[in-house]
Image (spheres, helix red, strand yellow):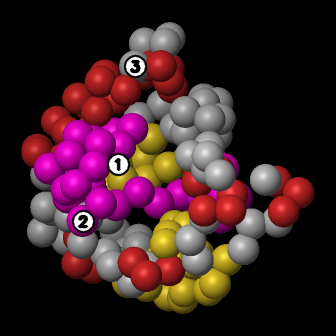
Amino acid sequence: MKLYRLSIAAHSRALDGGYGLLFDGRWNTAGHAVTYMASVPSLCLLEKLVHVEDPVLLPDLDIIVYDVPDDWSITRIEPDDLPPAWTEDEALTQSIGDEWHEARQSPLLSVPSAIIAVAGAEDRNFVVNHSHERAGDITIESVTPFRFDPRLL
């Protein structure tokens, strides 16, 4: 399976969950070694775009393509599995993600995007659990410089 991530170029080859150790995310609290990815490059773009406050300050970015082993166990959460206001309750999703991370039952958590929360959609976010014994099996297929189309900004 291919997964994608839009990253600051200086950190594009880092695949250790360092960001999750330092910062809260939608599906984790700081202190959990996770990396966020998406099923399609366009979702990476949207997920990054919602956090852009000033386009002038955007650092150089890369789009990274990962190869995830086909035999990986994936824990999947659908919007229907969550309370109606889950997109506004980060404490709830962080609790779910932290519990998944600490259980170490699967190396990958498949979650709906809070931007496009459509049940059954194939556009999904994925969270890699770097504490899982198989996390090191994921490989980088390619790293390509990325520039936002100015019409989006």
Q: Which residue is mark 1?
A: 109
Image location of residue 22, percent across then percent down: 22, 55
Q: What is the span of residues highlighted in magenta in the rendered image?
A: 18-46
Q: Residue furthest top?
A: 84
Res 20 seen here: yes
Q: Amino acid at mark 3?
A: Asp
Q: Is residue 101 above or below residue 79?
A: below
- Give the number of the disc on residue 89: 3
In this rendering, would 143 be left or right of 102? right
Q: Residue furthest right?
A: 151
Number of other residues with Cα within 10 Å of mark 2, as a class: few under 14, some 14 to 19, many 20 or more: some
Q: Is residue 20 above or below residue 135?
A: above
In this rendering, would 38 be left or right of 70? right
Q: Amino acid at mark 2?
A: Gly
Q: CA distance from mark 3 to mark 2?
A: 24 Å
Q: Which residue is mark 2?
A: 18
Residue 150 quadrant: bottom right
